[in-house]
Amino acid sequence: MTQSHTTRELEIELLALDLSTCTRCTGTLENIEKALSLVRGAIEATGTTVELRKTVVDSVEAAREHRFVSSPTIRVGGRDIVLETRESPCESCSDLCGCSEGTSCRVWTYQGAEHTEAPVGLIVEALLGELVGDGPVGDGPVGNGSAAPATDAYELPDNLRRFFAAPAEGEPASADACCSTEELASCCEPSEKASCCGEAAPA
């Protein structure tokens, strides 16, 4: 009798502000690919297929849709592979933003050291944890991190708000730079609208 086999799927998602010039984001993508190569044998032995999605979060709407908190973010099986969000100034994304405050990107803590790109070892542990059903593992317990539960309220971090509010190169700042017209009414407190959305923003 022929036995049927159910194919398992390993879902990996990389969410980033930029995948062209940001060294943290492009380096993290390279490390994901290295980690996949290292666990290829386990993936094949367990009959697992891999889906790697790369998403550039390029707007406030996209950030809210993906419940995006920090760049870059790696989710395995829908969960952020780290619990705590740490950031430091990112030169690459600050150049993209062009905002005076600059932009910060994620810092990864692994085996007592901080890294500006997701370490291969951390990603390997997360992948193996998902393969054996224990979930990602690392320096601490894994929560939803950037992948906040859908039942939790999502709030766009100020760091990302400033990044998306920055005018494109060569374009003047406008009142609706931080959000669409429909979102201006609720994007921030009335007292903050001048600094967030421009002097012309409605009260």
Image (cartoon, rainbow, N blue to C red):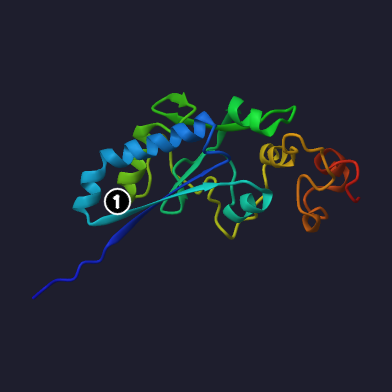
Pick out the residue farthest to the front: 170
- How far across and how far down the image is residue 108, in percent? 48, 31
Q: Is residue 179 left or right of residue 65?
A: right
- The x and y percentages for residue 5 are 20, 67
Asked if 65 appears above or below 173 in the picture, the reply is below
| Residue 138 visible within the image | no
Task: Name the one closer to the observer, 37 or 127.
Answer: 37
169 versus 142 height, above or below: above
Quarter of image, res 85: top right
Image point (46%, 26%), residue name: 115
Query: Could you tell me residue 177's position as x and y percent?
Result: 78, 45
- Quarter of the image that includes the N terminus: bottom left
Q: Nearer the viewer, residue 190 or 66?
A: 66
Q: In the current view of this chain or complex, which residue is farthest to the bottom?
A: 1
Vertical arrangement, residue 44 with respect to residue 106, above or below = below
**Label 1: which residue?**
131
Quadrant location of residue 39?
Answer: top left
Report the residue at 34% width, 33% height from top: 121
Residue, x 42% and y 25% (percent of image)?
112
Tell me the kind of residue under disc 1.
Leu
Residue 153: horizontal and vertical position, in percent? 65, 55
Residue 171 appears in the rendering: yes
